[in-house]
Image (cartoon, rainbow, N blue to C red):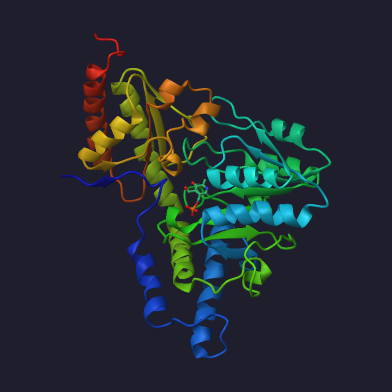
Amino acid sequence: MAKIYMDNGATTKPDSEVVSAMLPYYNEHFGNASSLHSFGQEAADALDRARQQVANLVGAQPEEIIFTSGGTESDNLALKGIAYLKKNAGKHIITSVIEHPAILNTCKNLQDDGFRVTYVPVDDQGLIDPAAVEDAITDDTILVSIMHGNNEIGTIQPIKEISKIAHDRGVLMHTDAVQSVGKIAVNVNDLDVDMLSISAHKIHGPKGVGALYVRKGTRLESLVKGGGHEFGKRAGTENIPGIVGLAKAAELAGQRLDDDASHVTKLRDAAITKILGSISESYLNGHPTQRLPNNVHLRFSYVEGESLLMLLDMKGVAVSTGSACSSKSLEPSHVLTALGIPPEQIHGSLRITFGRENTMDEVDYVVESLVGIVEKLRAMSPIAPKH
Ligand SMILES: Cc1ncc(COP(=O)(O)O)c(C=O)c1O
């Protein structure tokens, strides 16, 4: 049976070059980067090179890259790191209703600690109106955090415009770019952000490692207390093999960005056209053009996303319902709810996220499988109209 992985928004297969780059840092160069002897020096050199490679991918300086345990920690560090440092200057943060739980739950936590959070809404395609951010800024606002590419529906936000609004009012700007880095060109200066979150496992790197870009001169409170690692912004002996893996993944993502983006865009557009053209009452969720090049998010009337997922899995195809990050919850997706999609339609949603290894033949196989599965499920559904 075919084994087709189309859930690259959840995680990606580590590139073989990434794994090869990491292995020597387990087997031979296992030193602690803080040690003064040659073993330590090898690790420190690897750390320096990695910092440069990750910086290159987003147009940053190496000393602006703080290595973390992944996107979740980067988001926590950005929000809490600024909030705790600036708590005497202001207690208001602005974010959006469609952020990843790594942002939303950190905001909830900050609210418990006495901060105020404004959640700006989105339109029915998942776009934030920059004017809504402008209206929400008060004299008390210390940070705006708006995601770049949405992990569920793939909508890409106008970050540059929002950054300008924040900066004109003297407010710091963070973006969670976990889903956009490596998929589209991401440059911290073009986006004009002060902080930006990155995760290795979304770009064919290892799990449990990521980075936070922090613009030179931006101070934040370290959340992990200990030694002076990562310029005093994140203590703990560095995960050198993981960081080397992230750096290799970043290097490859940079080299392959144009090829990867045009490849997955073709697959995305073909999949959307073919599915919408062959299944009645199927709809695209998210923005039709301002969306991540690898993201297809659809909903089908009269079927359950879970049933679609399980039946596709039986045909060897791995996809996701809504967001993988919330797949263990029965709550309807907060992102699709924010778009104004009724709950019964939300439950009929499916996310397909392509990667560089997917092919057009696989798209055809998935479309054909999906047509049959939807037909079968609707035939069994008591509510689906029978033609
Ligand atoms: C937009 C977004 N932010 C943050 C994260 C969390 O990243 P990590 O899995 O590296 O903790 C994810 C993961 O799905 C994500 O999609």
Residue 302 in which image quadrant: top left
Q: Residue furthest bottom?
A: 37
Q: Is residue 195 left or right of residue 152?
A: right
Of 296 and 228, nearer the camera is 228
Q: Residue furthest left?
A: 1
As drawn, 122 above or below 168: above
Q: Position of residue 343 (x, y in %)?
A: 45, 23
Residue 221 in which image quadrant: bottom right
Q: Is residue 361 left or right of residue 43?
A: left
Q: Position of residue 248 (x, y in %)?
A: 44, 66
Q: Is residue 162 left or right of residue 291?
A: right
As drawn, 12 above or below 361: below
Residue 189 in sight = no
Residue 62 in sight = yes
Q: Position of residue 167 (x, y in %)?
A: 76, 46
Of 316 and 324, nearer the camera is 324
Task: Indicate the quadrant containing the C terminus: top left, top right, bottom left or bottom right.
Answer: top left
> Which residue: 52% across, 61% down?
69
Of 236 and 374, nearer the camera is 236
Q: Is residue 75 left or right of residue 345?
A: right
Q: Position of residue 382 (x, y in %)?
A: 28, 14
